[in-house]
Image (tube, coloured by chain):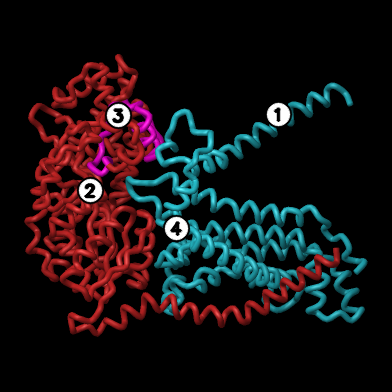
Chain colours: A cyan, B red
């Protein structure tokens, strides 16, 4: 290896390390703030050594928003939503990509247009609808309104377009039914796309704020972002509690991403033909 | 490899099965949780009999929740059939929920909601039939228990739509140790000129700034000064008042401190608190509620604080102003307007309730009769034994009314731009005149000429 490329590698590593530090530091600072009393958030220079207040902050946080209940709500709603939405969106994307039916393109462009409608425009009609069904303040209202998520449908359709028709024809000639074709042949080759869509849907629902805020009306039904937001009063904010809550809220996203990340790397159309 | 595919297929199949039975299973749970709010309201909607149990619901944020819960306990001694469920919601989140509910014709709204004073007229304008007419329910009899500015903020055309709760009489929260170190006596400061000279002295001797300001995003100091001078973004007829010489005078005052590098530029609320905690500013001009922030976040500075009134613009001039404060409204969709009104009238006009809210939660009352309590002449040790509540309560009757209108948020936006222009070197009169034009074209309101 020439000294020039060694130099190049050293410099690029240094830049990467600096970048990693810049992006990770806020998380570290948040986690440290979660272990310190409220006023320490404003300390100068910033507090970088973990304190001993984490359990007390957690206890206070539980007293004020019921963190465990809220964590359960968020986890339950997000997981069920991700499963449902992924199923619906994948099937819809499959239909748009591989089936010919009258009005297919028109319907798909309607979906594309709905990507552009700001969420706030549909908030009030949706709220009225949910209120008339008496779904307000239930898990139903938190999970179902966005199950058919246009972006995920779009993502799956684009990926499914890449699926060679020849493979599907071959399977059909071998006598594979449509259902089995979809489940055993199409889906396995879509793992990277499914993982991407799942991560997207999971993060979207986990962080979703405005709709859960409007759709819930009691503490027992709040999701994490809504509950954390309720900690922000006008002038008296316990930052220890806020930071503890934020630390807890960040964990599941990181975990979910790490679990699915492998799917990105593993084979794309790997064994499709051999099956 | 094929094993994990199978797993995925099974997972998908499980989802499908779940989706089939999950829908049914959850709809029964929705009946239980959804019912808790709707059934309680329908069950007692037929209440002609006062003894039928009534559960009221309320939306509020932060410390106000605790105050409500204690007040209902006091109220239940004479009204055991009334109970209250308070939802703790973020301050700004309350408005999102309230606006959505009002736009949806009152669906899902509580019986009682806390609204900040600067938003009340905006809501009344946007939803003229959205809130209960409190004068009809009998609130006029209590009008004289409150200072004039608060009455003006909670009523429209002589009709009450909100019941006054807390206020934010302003003061200069100052650090005694920094003043002493610089050899400045706070009692000698009567006018902004005095304070300007004192601030120069402090900056020279200690390097500490006079006060914090979010120069390019917030204009709280400017608003306090306008209020003190009896002017605001709008006059009482809703015309734009940015060209009023007194408004220009307030902005000039900001400019003078900025030019002399006496203003510490901070980033929003957190920046202000940060400057408070680290002692980089000698004073923080704010509403009385800032007391709570100081004692919560700057625990180590106990005893080092004091308060004096905003300096006057000329000797003997007005030193009273207000920043912040909130009141209770009853959505017109409430099925228990009468009960909600009775409870909130009790809450708003009973000195014991207001003193409890003040003592435990630092919510400064607007109820004038509450000031007779010994609490308001007590010495506050965190503030070096100063009788700060007496200072604030004596200020209340002199506070001029700020006129917010429904376009307050837009006016605020333009005023902040004007302030940013001024801190960037533009002449205040010029910057405000330009802001007035922009505001006029955004709101269609007339601009007062002088």
Which of these two is toward me, B89 or A71?
Answer: A71
Q: Which residue is mark 1?
A: A14
Q: Are marks 3 and 1 in contact (CB under 8 Å)?
A: no
Q: How far is mark 2 from mark 3, CA to CA?
A: 34 Å
Q: Which residue is mark 4?
A: A227
Q: How far is mark 4 from mark 1, CA to CA?
A: 40 Å
Q: Circle 3: is it few (<14), some (14-19), or many (20+) Cα within 10 Å?
A: many
Position of the C terminus of chain B, as image quadrant, is top left
Tell which tag, 1 or 2, sits nearer the viewer: 1
Q: Is residue A101 in view from this perspective?
A: yes
Q: Circle 4: is it few (<14), some (14-19), or many (20+) Cα within 10 Å?
A: many
Q: Residue furthest top?
A: B205
Do the residues marked 3 and 1 share a common chain? no
Q: Which residue is mark 2?
A: B446
Q: Are marks 2 and 3 in contact (CB under 8 Å)?
A: no
Give coordinates of residue A234: x percent, y percent: 33, 48
Q: Is residue B110 above or below residue B312?
A: below
Side (left or right) of B37 relative to A97 = left
Give coordinates of residue A24: x percent, y percent: 61, 39
Q: How far is mark 3 from mark 4, CA to CA?
A: 34 Å
């Amino acid at each position: 290896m020439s000294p020039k490329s060694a130099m190049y590698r050293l410099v690029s590593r240094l830049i990467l390390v600096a970048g990693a530090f810049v992006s990770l530091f806020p998380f570290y600072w948040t986690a440290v703030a979660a272990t310190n009393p409220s006023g320490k958030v404003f300390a100068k220079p910033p507090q970088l050594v973990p304190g001993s207040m984490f359990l007390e902050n957690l206890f206070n946080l539980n007293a004020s928003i019921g963190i465990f209940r809220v964590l359960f709500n968020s986890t339950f709603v997000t997981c069920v939503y991700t499963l449902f939405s992924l199923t619906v969106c994948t099937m819809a994307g499959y239909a748009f990509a591989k089936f010919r039916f009258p009005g297919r393109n028109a319907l798909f462009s309607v979906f594309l247009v709905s990507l552009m409608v700001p969420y706030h425009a549909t908030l009030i009609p949706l709220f009225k609808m949910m209120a008339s069904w008496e779904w307000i303040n239930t898990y139903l209202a938190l999970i179902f309104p966005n199950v058919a998520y246009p972006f995920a449908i779009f993502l799956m359709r684009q990926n499914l377009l890449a699926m060679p028709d020849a493979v599907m024809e071959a399977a059909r000639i071998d006598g594979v039914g449509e259902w089995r074709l979809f489940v055993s042949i199409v889906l396995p080759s879509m793992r990277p796309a499914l993982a991407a869509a799942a991560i997207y849907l999971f993060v979207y629902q986990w962080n979703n704020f405005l709709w859960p805020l409007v759709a819930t009306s009691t503490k027992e039904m709040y999701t994490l972002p809504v509950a954390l937001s309720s900690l922000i009063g006008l002038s008296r904010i316990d930052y220890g509690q806020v930071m503890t809550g934020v630390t807890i809220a960040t964990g599941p996203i990181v975990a979910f991403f790490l679990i699915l990340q492998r799917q990105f790397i593993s084979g794309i159309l790997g064994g499709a033909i051999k099956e | 490899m094929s094993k994990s595919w199978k797993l995925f297929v099974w997972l998908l199949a499980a989802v499908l099965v779940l989706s089939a039975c999950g829908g049914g299973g959850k709809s029964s749970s929705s009946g239980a949780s959804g019912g808790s709010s709707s059934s309680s309201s329908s069950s007692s909607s037929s209440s002609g009999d006062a003894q039928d149990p009534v559960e009221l619901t309320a939306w509020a944020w932060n410390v106000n929740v605790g105050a409500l819960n204690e007040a209902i306990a006091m109220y239940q001694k004479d009204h055991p059939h009334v109970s209250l469920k308070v939802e703790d919601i973020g301050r700004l989140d309350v408005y999102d929920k309230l606006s959505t509910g009002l736009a949806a014709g009152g669906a899902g709204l509580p019986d009682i909601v806390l609204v900040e004073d600067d938003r009340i007229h905006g809501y009344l304008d946007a939803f003229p039939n959205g809130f209960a007419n409190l004068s009809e329910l009998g609130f006029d009899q209590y009008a004289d228990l409150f200072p004039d500015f608060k009455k003006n903020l909670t009523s429209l055309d002589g009709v009450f739509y909100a019941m006054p709760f807390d206020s934010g009489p302003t003061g200069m929260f100052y650090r005694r140790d920094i003043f002493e170190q610089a050899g400045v006596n706070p009692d000698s400061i009567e006018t902004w000129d005095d304070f300007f000279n004192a601030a120069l002295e402090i900056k020279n001797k200690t390097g500490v700034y006079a006060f914090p300001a979010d120069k390019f995003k917030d204009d709280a100091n400017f608003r306090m000064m306008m209020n003190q001078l009896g002017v605001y973004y709008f006059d009482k007829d809703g015309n734009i008042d940015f060209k009023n010489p007194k408004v220009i005078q307030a902005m000039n005052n900001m400019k003078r401190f900025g030019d002399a590098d006496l203003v510490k530029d901070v980033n929003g609320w957190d920046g202000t608190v940060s400057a408070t905690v680290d002692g980089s500013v000698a004073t923080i001009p704010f509403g009385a509620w800032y007391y709570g922030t100081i004692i919560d976040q700057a625990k180590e500075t106990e005893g080092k604080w004091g308060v004096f009134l905003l300096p006057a613009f000329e000797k003997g001039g007005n030193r009273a102003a207000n920043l912040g404060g909130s009141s209770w409204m009853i959505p017109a969709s409430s099925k228990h307007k009468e009960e909600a009104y009775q409870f909130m009238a009790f809450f708003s006009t009973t000195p014991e309730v207001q003193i409890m809210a003040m003592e435990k939660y630092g919510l400064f009352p607007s109820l004038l009769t509450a000031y007779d309590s010994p609490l308001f002449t007590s010495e506050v040790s965190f503030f070096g034994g100063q009788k700060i509540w007496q200072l604030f309560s004596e200020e209340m009757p002199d506070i001029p009314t700020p006129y917010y209108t429904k376009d307050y948020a837009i006016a605020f936006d333009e005023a902040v731009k004007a302030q940013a222009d001024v801190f960037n070197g533009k002449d205040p009169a010029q910057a405000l005149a330009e802001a007035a034009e922009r505001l006029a074209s955004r709101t269609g309101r007339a601009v007062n000429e002088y």
